[in-house]
Image (cartoon, rainbow, N blue to C red):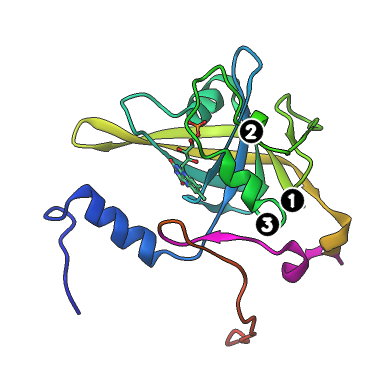
C-alpha cells in the first residue's frame, strides 16, 4: 500500500485519487432557472442521498473561479431545482450540457432534450428522463480551502417524485429498466454490472 497525505498532494492529485476511488458515482442531471427565466442544465456526480425521511439529496458544486457555477447560483436565488437520473438513453445529450456557457444562455439549446412542467415548483424538468425529483433548497454550505470557498454543497428536500410507469413495480424501481449511467474518472462512464444478493445478518 502506498500512503498519500492530502496536505502534501497537489489539488489535482487528490482529485484523481478521489474520483478514481469513489466509483461508480450516480449522476444528477440538474435543471435550474435564473432570475431572468433562463433554464440551465448540467450534470453532477458529487451527488447522493442524504436522508430518506425526509427525502433529501446533496450535490457538491465546485467553484472553478471565486463565483458559484450557474447551477449553484440559480439554486441559491430561486431556491428550487429538478434532479434527473442519467440513463443509457439520455447520457449523450446530458453530456452536451456540461459545457460552460454564459449565465444568460441555456445549455439545453445544444441538445434534443425537451422541457416538461413541474407539479410543485416553477423550474421545469426534462421529459427524456425516467426519474426526476422536484427539489427545494434546504441548505447551502460553503466548503473552504484555507479562506477560499471551493465548493457550494447543496442540500435539497424532494417535494415530488416523477417515476416512469415503465420501470415501476410494487412501488419499487426495476434497476435494469432504469439503466442508470454512473461516472468513473476522466471521460469514463459505467452501467450496471452483475447484480447479486446478500442477506443481512439477523
Ligand atoms: C458526468 C459529469 C459529472 C460532473 N460532476 C460534477 C460535479 O459533481 N460537480 C461539479 O462542480 N461539476 C461537475 N461536472 C462539471 C459540470 O457539469 C460543468 O462544470 C457544468 O458546466 C456546470 O454547469 P453550470 O455552470 O451551468 O452550472 C460534471 C460534468 C460531467 C460531464
Residue to which mark 2 is pinned: 110
Residue contact between numbered discs 2 and 3, judged by CB atoms under 8 Å: no
**Secondary element at image label 2:** helix
Which residue sits at x=56%, y=60%? 182
One can see residue 118 in this view: yes
Counting from the top left corner in percent of width and height, residue 86 is at 64, 52
Q: 154 above or below 27?
A: above
Which residue sits at x=46%, y=33%? 140
Magenta segment: 169-185
One can see residue 55 in this view: no
Residue reaching furthest to the top: 36
Q: Is mark 2 within 8 Å of ligand 1?
A: no
**Secondary element at image label 1:** strand
Q: CA distance from mark 2 to mark 3?
A: 19 Å
Where, quadrant-wise, is the C terminus in this rendering? bottom right
Counting from the top left corner in percent of width and height, residue 191 is at 61, 68
N-terminal-most mark, 2 or 3? 3
Residue to which mark 3 is pinned: 87
Residue to which mark 1 is pinned: 131
Numbered badge on residue 157: none
Circle nearer the viewer, 2 or 3: 2
N-terminal-most mark, 1 or 3? 3
Amino acid at each position: 500500500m502506498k500512503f498519500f497525505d492530502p496536505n502534501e498532494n497537489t489539488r489535482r492529485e487528490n482529485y484523481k485519487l478521489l474520483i478514481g476511488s469513489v466509483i461508480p458515482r450516480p449522476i444528477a442531471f440538474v435543471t435550474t432557472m435564473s432570475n431572468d427565466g433562463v433554464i440551465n442544465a448540467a450534470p453532477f456526480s458529487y451527488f447522493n442521498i442524504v436522508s430518506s425521511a425526509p427525502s433529501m439529496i446533496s450535490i457538491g458544486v465546485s467553484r472553478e473561479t471565486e463565483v458559484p457555477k450557474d447551477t449553484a447560483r440559480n439554486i441559491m436565488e430561486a431556491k428550487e431545482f429538478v434532479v434527473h437520473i442519467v440513463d443509457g438513453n439520455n447520457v449523450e445529450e446530458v453530456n452536451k450540457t456540461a459545457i460552460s456557457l454564459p449565465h444568460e444562455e441555456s445549455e439545453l439549446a445544444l441538445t434534443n432534450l425537451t422541457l416538461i412542467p413541474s407539479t410543485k415548483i416553477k423550474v421545469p424538468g426534462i421529459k427524456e428522463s425516467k426519474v426526476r425529483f422536484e427539489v427545494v433548497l434546504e441548505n447551502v454550505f460553503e466548503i473552504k480551502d484555507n479562506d477560499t470557498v471551493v465548493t457550494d454543497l447543496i442540500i435539497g428536500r424532494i417535494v415530488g417524485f416523477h417515476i416512469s410507469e415503465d420501470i415501476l413495480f410494487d412501488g419499487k424501481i426495476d434497476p435494469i429498466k432504469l439503466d442508470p449511467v454512473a461516472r468513473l474518472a476522466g471521460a469514463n462512464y459505467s452501467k450496471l454490472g452483475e447484480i447479486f444478493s446478500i442477506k443481512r445478518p439477523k
